[in-house]
């Protein structure tokens, strides 16, 4: 068959003229992709399958003041009191406008206290009706910043807004430079936000509109290039930034650093998409609704999946019969890098939308340090497993070595996509040198941003504990 | 393996604080952790930790030193039989075995003295035993001339461990590379036994053949008569310190260090680059000076240049710790090593002093890199304000 010359010419034009043109136009309408080269994805076994399992009954929910660094709770309820969702449970002593409210309706069952009567948990027995206190229903676009603030403070939704520096509760008296929302979680086995928030663009938009009134700057969203046609990409009244690269690309702190790094004296706020949804619901319906979708993940979970439950839900029902029970297991509220170890009858953390169960690994390993390691997963190159990569690995909570002083250099930098010298910053913290901490960028990080360093550290340095110690000192000294 | 585990677990209560054998605590702990990675799990922060630990890291450096060690053993035998004129009548294994017997005591002395001191200090301070000496203990024998008396090895090792490492707080805290200080200590304390032409070849009580000199290519070059057999220098069949003669074996070690990411390729590369630059400069102004005219790459295969660049300069504790600093640090080591070698004939080997000097200045280099980072942050704040 002969192809005519015109046909060839047409094809030529399509290929070499139209196609590039279309691609360039498409490319230009997209925001620029920030490609983060440093970081690492830990390939864990037990990713949640993308279907929503049958919802388990949530019989108890809890608020844990310990989820907030530096919070001193003043209780407003007693055991036996009946509350509705959105009714104040306690407030922060040093931030007395900020209320923490009941996640669902029911009866206050008990208040668990630890050492020196420190409040650990306020437990509410859910009545299953999820009745909410009524708030005014209105479009945030027509409200003033003060009105929005008041509604957020009263409903308890203010507690979802964090500030940087320090990662502590946002102060209602301040106006942040910008507000940042990371719309993907890059941590190991993290829930897929496109799945979790599927179809909720309208609620997110209302949430964004409310927050946009509270800042003098912009609301910045961070998405992956793959999300370009997803739940978040259509949102208005925001600046969308794209980030590609391995974890911690999804950490909001990394995104802030890339877009508008925090300098001394500046404050930005951060919120999760889940927080935006709650705020959106509040303004659209005049009610609070703290239901959320949580990913149940990890190698010890029989069938990892997504489940619908409440903010602060009791883990007992969720985990009943769900794990392998092969040996001793570690239950983590959150992900393996930054989550909190909890007993099986404890509660989901305030900001966590993931439960991970991994083996505890409290066993001796014979000559483990000399093992060629054909089956071992490691970010370094000292194990042969690197040559035979598998898709996913089971990792346990063993330290795999003794704690040492800093010996190796150049290890941490590989996992921090920021213009920061992590080891020097950590040493400044250990020396309690406030000036140095400030100069080396303590305002730009919280624990999660250096969590990968802790995972990869040869000397098993407790990086996140040191960072928190530094942040606490700064908060105490500088406020 | 269960019975070993059981032994350590059963004996653990006896070495606890207040128990009868508490003075053996560090030894027990050291041996237990050597045999078994402990069952301790994460208490705070990240729940998972990488499999790597300091034992493995140090183990890999020791592994990387093995080719140099084996070649050093063979060369010791080779030089011996060549000196007594019997080389043609001995087979490979006889040559190697002679060297093996001569070298092993060095290793034993270095480890026994060094680890002994480490154990005592760990016990005194209530620390775990730290792995740093696993490498130092192997490096020390490899940079000794074969005729060094063992008591000198013991003294220098003790000096290095106590005054260079422990007084600063142990592994990770030292300013200079302990192994190099051990060598420097001997060099300055016992100069007559550590240099000259008689220390490099083990005669083993036998008589050398006529015309035997025993001088290293470096000494010959420093005397103004460079006479380098390139192939033998590369393979390592020349007189010299035990482990530093074979550039080939050192390169194998370098490949291991770089592939595993344990040694910094930046330091190794920039050290050679610095050496090359200085070598070229010297060659350009050589005139009649035969040593200055020596091509730069011949510098790399004689003396301790390659060994120092690969195994000494890359010590993460005594070197620079910032990534940019590593380029500067390595480059200056290369420059200084060749400069000292050629320009100062009193010290035939410049590498040792160059590295120790740059060890001293490494914190200064890092200081400026860190200051740079701080200034950048300040500038950013000003632009924004």
Image (cartoon, coloured by chain):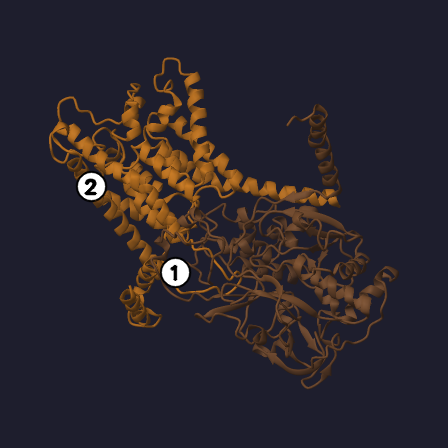
Chain colours: A brown, B orange
Residue holding disc 2: B100
User: Horizontal and vertical percent for residue A90?
Assistant: 71, 75
Q: Position of residue B191 (x, y in %)?
A: 27, 34
Question: Mark 1, residues whose alpha carbon is within 10 Å: few (<14), some, or many (≥20)?
Answer: some
Q: Which mark is residue A385?
A: none
- Quick one: SS at disc 1? loop
Choose between A378 and B337: the one closer to the eye: A378
Which residue corresponds to the image point at 87% horizontal and 62% vertical from the top-left? A143
Q: Quadrant of the C terminus of chain A?
A: bottom right
**Chain for disc number 1:** B
Place of residue B68 in the rendered image (x, y in percent of width and height, measured from the top left): 30, 38
- Identify the residue position indicated by label 1 in the image: B127
Q: Mark 2 belongs to which subunit? A: B
Instruction: Residue A144: name its quadrant.
Output: bottom right
Both labels 1 and 2 in a single chain: yes
Front: mark 1 or 2: 2
Q: Is residue B260 left or right of residue A109?
A: left
At mark 2, the secondary structure is helix
Q: Nearer the viewer, residue A7 or A471?
A: A7
Q: Residue furthest bottom?
A: A80
User: Where's the N terminus of chain A, which quadrant?
Assistant: top right
């Amino acid at each position: 068959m002969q192809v005519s010359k015109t046909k060839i010419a047409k094809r030529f034009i399509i290929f070499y003229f139209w196609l590039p043109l279309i691609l360039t136009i498409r490319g230009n309408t997209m925001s620029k992709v920030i490609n983060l080269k440093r970081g690492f994805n830990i390939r864990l076994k037990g990713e949640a399958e993308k279907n929503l399992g049958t919802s388990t009954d949530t019989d108890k929910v809890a608020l844990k003041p310990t989820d907030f660094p530096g919070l001193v709770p003043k209780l407003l309820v007693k055991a036996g009191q009946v509350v509705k969702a959105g009714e104040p449970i306690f407030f922060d002593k040093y931030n007395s406008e900020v209320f923490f409210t009941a996640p669902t309706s029911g009866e206050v069952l008990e208040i668990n206290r630890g050492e020196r009567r420190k409040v650990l948990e306020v437990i509410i027995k859910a009545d299953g009706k999820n009745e909410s206190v009524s708030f005014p229903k209105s479009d945030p676009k027509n409200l003033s910043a003060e009105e929005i603030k008041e509604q957020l403070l009263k409903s308890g939704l203010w507690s979802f807004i964090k500030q940087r520096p320090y990662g502590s509760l946002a102060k209602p008296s301040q106006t942040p430079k910008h507000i940042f929302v990371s719309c993907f979680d890059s941590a190991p086995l993290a829930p897929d936000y496109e799945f979790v928030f599927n179809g909720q663009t309208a609620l997110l938009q209302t949430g964004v509109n409310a927050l946009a009134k509270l800042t003098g700057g912009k609301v910045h969203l961070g998405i992956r290039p793959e999300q370009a046609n997803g739940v978040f990409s259509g949102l208005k009244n925001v600046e969308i930034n794209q980030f590609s690269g391995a974890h911690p690309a999804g950490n909001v702190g990394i995104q802030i650093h890339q877009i508008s790094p925090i300098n001394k004296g500046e404050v930005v706020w951060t919120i999760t998409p889940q927080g935006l949804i709650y705020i959106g619901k509040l303004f659209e319906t005049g009610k609070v609704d703290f239901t959320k979708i949580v990913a149940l993940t990890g190698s010890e979970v029989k069938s990892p999946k997504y489940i619908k439950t409440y903010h602060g839900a009791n883990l007992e029902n969720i985990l009943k019969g769900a794990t392998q029970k092969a040996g001793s297991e570690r239950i983590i509220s959150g992900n393996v890098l930054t989550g909190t170890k909890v007993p099986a009858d404890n509660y989901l953390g305030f900001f966590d939308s993931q439960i991970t169960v991994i083996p505890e690994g409290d066993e001796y390993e014979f000559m483990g340090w000399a093992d060629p390691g054909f089956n071992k997963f490691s970010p370094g190159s000292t194990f042969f497993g690197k040559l035979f990569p598998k898709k996913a690995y089971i990792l346990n909570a063993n330290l795999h070595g003794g704690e040492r002083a800093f010996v190796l250099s150049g290890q941490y930098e590989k996992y921090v996509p920021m213009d920061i010298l992590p080891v020097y910053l950590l040493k400044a913290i250990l020396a309690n040198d406030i000036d140095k901490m400030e100069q080396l960028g303590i305002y730009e990080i919280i624990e999660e941003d250096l969590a990968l360093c802790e995972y990869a550290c040869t000397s098993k340095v407790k990086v996140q504990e040191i960072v928190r110690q530094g942040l606490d000192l700064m908060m105490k000294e500088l406020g | 393996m269960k019975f070993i585990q059981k032994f350590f677990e059963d004996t653990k209560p006896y070495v606890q604080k207040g128990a009868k054998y508490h003075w053996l605590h560090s030894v027990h702990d050291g041996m237990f952790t050597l045999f078994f990675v402990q069952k301790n799990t994460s208490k705070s922060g990240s729940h998972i930790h990488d499999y790597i630990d300091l034992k493995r890291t140090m183990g890999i450096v020791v592994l990387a030193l093995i080719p140099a060690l084996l070649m050093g053993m063979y060369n010791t035998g080779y030089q011996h039989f060549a000196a007594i004129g019997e080389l043609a009548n001995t087979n490979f294994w006889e040559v190697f075995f002679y060297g093996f017997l001569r070298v092993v005591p060095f290793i034993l002395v270095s480890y026994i003295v060094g680890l002994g001191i480490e154990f005592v200090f760990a016990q005194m301070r209530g620390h775990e035993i730290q792995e740093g000496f696993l490498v130092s203990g192997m490096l020390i024998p490899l940079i000794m001339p074969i005729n060094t008396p063992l008591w000198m090895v013991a003294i220098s090792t003790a000096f290095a461990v106590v005054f260079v490492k422990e007084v600063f707080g142990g592994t990770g805290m030292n300013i200079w590379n302990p192994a190099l200080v051990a060598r420097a200590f001997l060099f300055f304390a016992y100069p007559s036994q550590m240099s000259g032409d008689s220390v490099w070849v083990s005669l083993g009580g036998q008589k050398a053949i006529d015309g035997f000199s025993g001088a290293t290519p470096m000494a010959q070059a420093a005397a103004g008569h460079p006479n380098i057999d390139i192939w033998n220098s590369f393979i390592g069949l020349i007189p010299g310190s035990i482990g530093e003669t074979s550039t080939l074996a050192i390169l194998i070690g370098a490949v291991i260090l770089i592939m595993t990411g344990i040694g910094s390729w930046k330091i190794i590369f920039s050290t050679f680059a610095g050496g090359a630059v200085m070598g070229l400069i010297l060659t350009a102004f050589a005139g009649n000076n035969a040593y200055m005219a020596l091509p730069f790459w011949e510098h790399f295969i004689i003396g301790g240049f390659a060994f120092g660049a690969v195994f000494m300069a890359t010590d993460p504790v005594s070197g620079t710790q910032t990534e940019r600093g590593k380029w500067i640090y390595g480059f200056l080591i290369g420059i200084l090593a060749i400069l000292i070698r050629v320009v100062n004939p009193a010290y035939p080997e410049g590498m040792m002093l160059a590295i120790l000097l740059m060890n001293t200045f490494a914190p200064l280099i890092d200081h400026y890199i860190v200051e740079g980072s701080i200034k950048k942050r300040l500038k950013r704040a000003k632009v924004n304000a």
